[in-house]
Amino acid sequence: QVQLVESGGGSVQSGGSLRLSCAASVIPARFSCMAWFRQSPGKKREGVAVIDRDGDTNYANSVKGRFTISLDSAKHTMYLEMTSLKPEDTAMYYCALDLRGMTTVGALTRKVDVERDYEYWGQGTQVTVSP
């Protein structure tokens, strides 16, 4: 069983930056992918960024060039560095982990309902960006 705990959310003005953290109780070496998703009220949960155990990454087009995902395996912690934040980035951000090998980094931006590939989820951290 893996527990994931997000932190680092908050309120910032447009153009600001935040760094989200996802602390895992353990990240088994056999993990497939870890990812960040976000969901705002009335909208479907969407994949934001993903990293696999080889360090390959993928990003949603809406955040490409502004967000950076990284993983510190020694600390069992994944990060999402967010810069040039926009009001449309406002959402609850969740981290997720796939241990079953259900997904790939490419699937984040290609597969409908890709969130079903991830079996472990954190509780989320709120990010609010004001104009």
Image (spheres, rainbow, N blue to C red):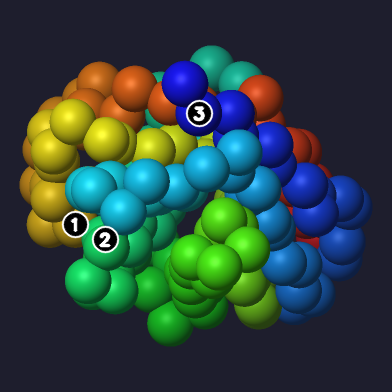
Residue 120, located in which quarter of the rendered image?
top left
Q: Which residue is mark 2?
A: 52
Residue 93 visible to the viewer: no
Q: Secondary structure at mark 1?
A: loop
Mark 1 or mark 3: name the one nearer the start of the chain. Answer: 3
Q: Secondary structure at mark 3?
A: loop
User: Of the residues shown, which amino acid type is indicated by label 2?
Assistant: Asp
> Dot 1, how many residues are within 10 Å of its Cα: few (below 14), some (14-19), or many (20+)?
many
The answer to whether residue 10 is left or right of residue 87 is: right
Q: Give me the C-alpha separation between circle 3 and circle 2.
A: 17 Å
Counting from the top left corner in percent of width and height, residue 49 is at 39, 58
Q: Which residue is mark 3?
A: 2
Mark 1–mark 2 contact, CB under 8 Å? yes
Q: Which residue is mark 1?
A: 105
Q: Give me the C-alpha separation between circle 1 and circle 2.
A: 7 Å
> Dot 2, how many residues are within 10 Å of its Cα: few (below 14), some (14-19), or many (20+)?
many
User: Of the residues shown, which amino acid type is indicated by label 1?
Assistant: Val
Mark 3 or mark 2: name the one nearer the start of the chain. Answer: 3
Of tags 3 and 2, the one toward the viewer is 3
Residue 55, located in which quarter of the rendered image?
bottom left
User: Of the residues shown, which amino acid type is indicated by label 3?
Assistant: Val
Return the residue nearer the eye: 51 or 83.
51
55 shown above or below 2: below
